[in-house]
Amino acid sequence: MATSPTDRPLGPTRLPPPADPPTGAAVTSERLLQAAHELLHERGGGAVSVSDLCTRAGANVAMVKYCFGSKDGLYDALVERVVGSFQADLAQLDELALPPRATMERHVGGIARNFLRFPYLSSLLNERLRRADPETVARLSEAFALPTRAWHARLLESGAAAGAFRQVDPTFFFFSVIGICEFLFSARSWLEQTFDERLSGDLVERFVAHTTRMVLDGIGPERPDVLGSR
Amino acid sequence: MATSPTDRPLGPTRLPPPADPPTGAAVTSERLLQAAHELLHERGGGAVSVSDLCTRAGANVAMVKYCFGSKDGLYDALVERVVGSFQADLAQLDELALPPRATMERHVGGIARNFLRFPYLSSLLNERLRRADPETVARLSEAFALPTRAWHARLLESGAAAGAFRQVDPTFFFFSVIGICEFLFSARSWLEQTFDERLSGDLVERFVAHTTRMVLDGIGPERPDVLGSR
């Protein structure tokens, strides 16, 4: 990489593009998604009105309802787009054909960095999972949970076959590895207000080093119990 | 223990009591807290109205406003009571004077079991941390985040001194160890709707076995890199 992670611009980047180039009304819905991404990024997940969204997107206020049914529908589509884009990261990792430990190390770092890249993600995702609307959950499952757990299962299996990992339950691993990265972001109030830290790129890189080591050692191959104290 | 964890009753237990026995209006506020605990438990965190709360508590509907200002105020007090009660768990663990690894193992299991015991906790807590109201965050910090991180720091230090743990950042560890337990509960929709599991006592015990091992191996003492592939 030419730049270190902390050199990256702090503002929002482009939202990951849709699978197919938009045409017709999809051009407007794409502009609304990009506007939501930018405004939620700028306001740290704070309140964004339909009027704000349409002004930023240069769209008529009726278009949120027309394209997404409601602002919640727009946010559902935004979360789906963002978590769906993570499958491209996994495909790129697969193409590198690194050993299992190195693959897992990059994956764990990628999860934590994605929560920083999309600072509204933990909040919107948790809200949708809490609401537990079957259709929304199913769309997020197809876009993210099912393919990600399947990818974890394949990597854990190839790592176990290579002696790099012990046997690990892929469903529990899915929740563990996301949770270990996610809570720093959803509990950002404690990090910043209580522990007087800033959720900066630098801090996230130190957190990535901490987290990747915990996960990799946590699923490492069997070793003798050092102290016999378990 | 006389009973296995899965033998425990599934209904809500008594809310942990306040530090001092309530008198006057505090008797009613205590009944309202217990009613909120029971109703949120029964409804899996679903909607509970002020009227529901007051009927269950046998209190006049004006008492929610009188005692807590609003339903959100009542929920703030409930979250504070619940997370504050976890300090008693830590004090009990300290009294056992177990070796650091055994202490940590019980602690990690205790976190996961507490999210099952208070099934509305992850949702209410995440909402309060997202809202980031300085006064609420400060109260939750005093009741939970500050003493828990301090307890982690002491345990990690004594474990490192005993050769049971490597050096671990206590602030990052605080977020990691809660997050690794918490996300299974906040993403319960994926567990149950996507992966077709039930968030039962049995499943949580299997999750505890997975999680305690990941955390304990994840902070275990230095070992040679087995494969040299990092």
Image: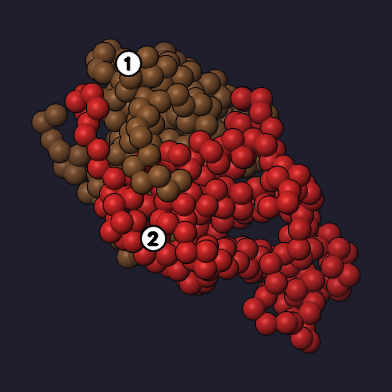
Chain colours: A brown, B red
The residue that disc 1 covers is: A162
The residue carrying pointer 1 sits among few (fewer than 14), some (14 to 19) or many (20 or more) residues within 10 Å by Cα, namely some
Q: Residue at x 25, y 47 (%)?
A: A206
Would residue A65 be found to the left or right of residue A192 on screen? right
Which of A2 and B13 lies nearest the eye of the viewer?
B13
Mark 2 lies on a secondary structure that is helix
Tell me the crowding category of disc 2: few under 14, some 14 to 19, or many 20 or more residues within 10 angstroms, Cα based.
Answer: many
**Residue B136: % across, % down:** 53, 68
Q: Residue at x 84, y 68 (%)?
A: B57
How far apart are labels 1 and 2 at the CA level? 34 Å
Residue indicated by mark 2: B155
Which quadrant does the N terminus of chain A fall into?
top left
Q: Chain of mark 2?
A: B
**Percent position (x, y) of residue B112?**
57, 47
Q: Are marks 1 and 2 on the same chain?
A: no
Percent x, y for residue A147?
Answer: 48, 19
Q: Which mark is residue A114?
A: none
At label 2, the amino acid type is Leu
Q: At x 10% / y 31%, what residue is drawn?
A: A2
